[in-house]
Image (cartoon, helix red, strand yellow):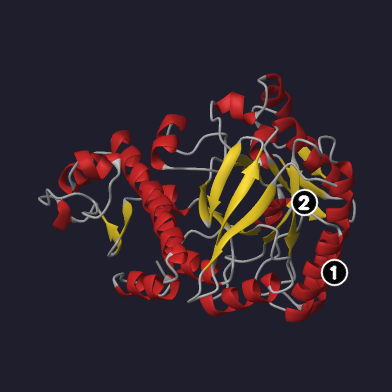
Amino acid sequence: MKHPVTFEITHVCAQSGARTGILHTPHGDVETPMFMPVGTQATVKFLSPEELYALGAGVVLANTYHLWLMPGEDIVAKAGGVQKFMNYDGPMLTDSGGFQVFSLADTRKITEEGVAFKNLRNGDRLFLSPEKSIEIQNAIGADIMMSFDECIPYPASYEYAKASMERTLRWAERGKNANQRPDEQAIFGIVQGGDYEDLRTYCAEKLVEMAFAGYAIGGTSVGEDKETMVRMVDWSQRHLPLDKPRYLMGVGAVNDLLEAVSLNIDMCDCVLPTRLARHGNAMTSEGRIGITKARYKEDFGPLDPKCDCYACRNYSRAYINHLLRAKEGFGSRLMSIHNIRFLLKLMEDVRDAIKNDRYNDFKAETLANMKFDERGF
């Protein structure tokens, strides 16, 4: 079967083995490795689609669970799909609702058929199955859909991780068979298995047998330490085909992104840049800075002298400090523009370093210039 989303490798770094590629989608081609901004409610918080284009965004995410609740997938479908609904004419990806199985653990019940949720908006009972997840994603219309899976907590017992992983595989096959638009929308399978190498290996190998258009690595960034996360990613990617895109879900910290690229990951996403922005934290070439601190009240330099974004070209740390302390929305907008651009520019530099066969050097230089706390960047 020919998938509507395909991938080609364009260069492998002689120094590191990291790779660049092109993801071909119905809504355009995107260079990899890439960072994907998250637009949970069919909008990236505080940014317009026009600003996303200007910042260099490629694939943008939308959240299946949240669009199912509001405005409803039928309304998105009537608008002509999520791209037309939000006026973003680039490639898009929808998650499956599987992360909500983790994040709404107190209000859900898992069975073989699917997951029962409580609607946090009105208290209604909801039920999401692999088939329902794909049905909703078919209606939303993104280029890439994700298999419905369970994102398990860390730590989890071997028995729980094994049972969950095996169910995730059964759900993956059911979801793949439910796709009503296979010529227009591709599905990625998701590798689970907790922090157990044999489970990760088995899950990856079984997903590859199902021949998905691409493969995601899930169940990371859920409370584990950095060393454990890297192990889980490495165990998973070793058993995925080289000629298919690899997507590490929920990763947006600089050190994690750079490590992911070393492990031949092509796609990453995270709400981190806009979440940090809302709380007054700027991602910069020297590390994270809390711009609301008193020391920036009279700092008339840009958020990051090395950044080319609209915020850094036009506004000072002092002004943005004032906006945020005054709780003016423009401050959050400027911070969001900067943080998204920072990560998109980081990945542009990553691709250049790979093409010039110096990715290990670039990674070391970048990390040496940044200040990290115990959580990373």
Q: Nearer the viewer, residue 356 or 51?
A: 356
**Amino acid, disc 2:** Phe
**Amino acid, disc 1:** Ala
Residue at image point 82% right, 73% down: 202
Proximity of marks 1 and 2: CB atoms separated by less than 8 Å: no
Looking at this view, name the residue that lies furthest to the top. Answer: 78
Residue 165, relative to residue 294: is it above or below? below
**Pointer 1 residue:** 163
Locate residue 72: give its quadrant. top right
Name the front one of labels 1 and 2: 2
Query: Dot 1: within a 10 Å radius of its alpha carbon, few (fewer than 14), some, or many (20 or more) residues?
Result: few
Residue 296, relative to residue 88: is it above or below? below
**Pointer 2 residue:** 148
281 on left or right of 43: left
Q: Nearer the viewer, residue 342 or 164?
A: 342
Residue 293 in the image: x percent, y percent? 21, 56
45 on left or right of 209: left
Distance, label 1 to label 2, CA atoms, is 15 Å
Residue 109 in the image: x percent, y percent? 80, 54
Locate residue 363: give its quadrant. bottom left
Asked if residue 129 shows in the view, the reply is no
Residue 221 in the image: x percent, y percent? 57, 65
Residue 295 in the image: x percent, y percent? 14, 58
Residue at image point 44% right, 56% down: 347
Query: Dot 2: within a 10 Å radius of its alpha carbon, few (fewer than 14), some, or many (20 or more) residues?
Result: many
Asked if residue 317 shows in the view, the reply is yes
Question: Quick one: SS at disc 1?
Answer: helix
85 on left or right of 374: right
317 on left or right of 8: left
Quadrant holding the C terminus: bottom left
Residue 148, relative to residue 228: is it above or below? above
